[in-house]
Amino acid sequence: MIKFTVLTIAIIATTATVAYSLTLLDRIVHVRLYDYGLQFSLDWANLYWTVLRITLALLALQSCSHWSTWFPYIENTFAKNNLR
């Protein structure tokens, strides 16, 4: 159980770090680069938005897949130990 808890904490920390990094990247594109003269163009914006959305979808998929393994594990642990 301790190994699984440590793994869960590591995955949550990684997920939060990736989400925060994406926020920082978005801020760099939408604030800093415009200060340096970035001109909006659908050529780069569509690619940027596509990559950002795919990354967020993969992040959500990773989180959901981990949580789908977490709850059955807890149910089995409680059932074995009669902790209900």
Image (cartoon, grey):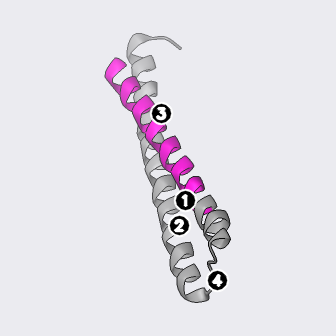
Circle 4 is placed at which residue position?
A: 39
Judging depth in this view, the residue of 52 and 31 nearest the camera is: 31
Q: Give the range drawn in magenta.
A: 1-26
**Rendered view: 37 above or below 84:** below
Which residue matches tag 2?
52
Q: How crowded is mark 2: few (under 14 residues within 10 Å), some or many (20 or more)?
A: some
Q: Residues within 10 Å of mark 1 (few under 14, many from 20)?
A: some
Q: Quadrant of the N terminus?
A: top left
Q: Mark 1 points at which residue?
A: 25
Query: Which residue is nearer to you in this view: 68 or 80?
Result: 68
Give the vertical position of 11 relative to 59 (above or below): above
Q: How far apart are marks 4 and 1 (CA)?
A: 17 Å
Residue type, numbered disc 1: Leu
- Measure the alpha-carbon separation of dots 2 and 1: 10 Å
Question: In the image, is residue 43 above or below residue 59?
Answer: below
Marks 2, 3: nearer the viewer: 2
Relative image position of residue 63 (x, y in whole percent)? 48, 46
37 or 82, nearer to the observer: 37
Magenta stretch: dominant secondary structure: helix
Contact between marks 1 and 3 (CB within 8 A): the answer is no
